[in-house]
Image (cartoon, rainbow, N blue to C red):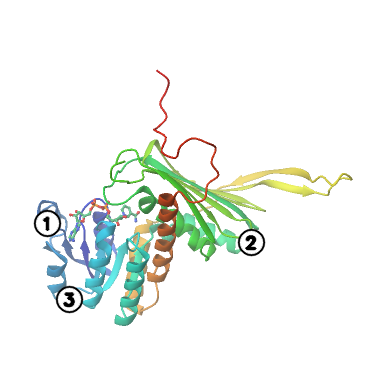
Amino acid sequence: MVRIGVVGAGYWGPNLMRNFAACPLTSLAAVCDQDAARLQKFRRLYPGAALVPSLDDLLGLPGVDAVALATPVQTHYPLAAAALRAGKHVLVEKPLAASAREAEDLVRLARERGRVLMVDHTYLFSPAVRHLKALIDSGEVGDLYFIDSVRINLGLFQHDTNVVWDLAPHDLSITQYLLGTPPREVVAFGSCHADAAGGIEDLAYVHLDYGGGLLAAFHLSWLSPVKVRQFILGGSKKSVVFNDLEPAEKLKVYDRGFTVKTEDQRRRVQIGYRMGSVVSPHLEQGEPLQAMVQHFARCVQSGAEPASGGEFGLGIVRILERAQVSIKSAGPRVAFGGAADDPPRRAAA
Ligand SMILES: NC(=O)c1ccc[n+]([C@@H]2O[C@H](COP(=O)([O-])OP(=O)(O)OC[C@H]3O[C@@H](n4cnc5c(N)ncnc54)[C@H](O)[C@@H]3O)[C@@H](O)[C@H]2O)c1
């Protein structure tokens, strides 16, 4: 049994607690939160777990093997570094850290101390994403043309991070897992509405060029009245739509696309359309978060590098950082006239 202490009992932490408590390979040894009232709610749920107000108290408990951090992103680095220095294995919620420099330091620390460092990029453990990777690797999708993801909903507005750092880790980690390579270029647009004074983007469009004609576009928003979680991957043979809000048929494989017929005498390309069937493959059942915590426990037991280990998490942070630079620098854009700081558009009175 790997004995775990979970730090952060806010929105996401209880999901980690529930899964560590249910996992046959782990036990929930402690719950830590600086908010005493929040902490007390877990006394009845997990009577066997120690309740502590700080990471220092958690690190002082005997027999805790690993620490899982579900605290705001700005705290990931100091808390993870302290836990690694204390000889604990560490699971960090996505994203690994608030900067690539911090993430690099955590990777170095974990290597020096011989501890497992893993990031909870939950989608890597989703049966739909695993199936999608198998379709790509088997050649069934063909050459990859595009990835188009829409991840929008109303809120949850955050004060210390923007919509890119909050939501894009999902799309970036799925894409990194599927392709195994980082993008060549990143360009991003973002705008602030709820917290314009704080400069916190709540709407963003992140575009990536993976080379070979493969482009990806991620649309991220806390402003949308409807929740959408749709990830489309287009290939030369098949295209796949992953809709995470579908209860049953999360993945649909479309035998649809185009075929290039021979050029005519005027050297114009003749395009034909392929309108084949749509198949919803059978997917394994099971909660991705449970698969994630089991993977973490196995890596702690065996010393193996996790699928979403420190290096993987660092790669995601590097892309987030570049997207942020692109947003803030309003990089090379082709202007259509009008000042960059035009006031928001309003309907005519
Ligand atoms: N994997 C996913 O799908 C997913 C989903 C949501 C959130 N997250 C991640 O989970 C993390 C937490 O997000 P959240 O929405 O639960 O935040 P939250 O603000 O709801 O909760 C954070 C908790 O951490 C506590 N805390 C903060 N600093 C602390 C410290 N130094 N010591 C002890 N406790 C401390 C706070 O009191 C609070 O209870 C973020 O990294 C976020 O990106 C992941």
Query: In the current view of this chain or complex, which residue is farthest to the top?
Result: 349
Q: Quadrant of ligand 1?
A: bottom left
Q: Amino acid at mark 2?
A: Gly
Q: Residue 213, image x and y in percent?
A: 63, 56
Of marks 1 and 2, which one's residue comes earlier in the chain?
A: 1
Quadrant for the C terminus, please. Answer: top left
The residue where tag 2 is placed is 139
Q: Residue 219, image x and y in percent?
A: 46, 45
Tell me if mark 2 has few (under 14), some (14-19) or many (20+) residues whose alpha carbon lies within 10 angstroms of its own: few
Of marks 3 and 2, which one's residue comes earlier in the chain?
A: 3
- The local secondary structure at tag 1 comes to helix
Q: Amino acid at mark 1?
A: Arg
Mark number for residue 43? Answer: 1
The residue where tag 3 is placed is 63
| Mark 1–mark 2 distance (CA, rounded to whole Å) | 51 Å
Q: Hey, which quadrant is residue 344 in on the image?
A: top left
Q: Residue 33, image x and y in percent?
A: 16, 58
Quadrant for the N terminus, please. Answer: bottom left
Q: Is mark 2 within 8 Å of ligand 1?
A: no
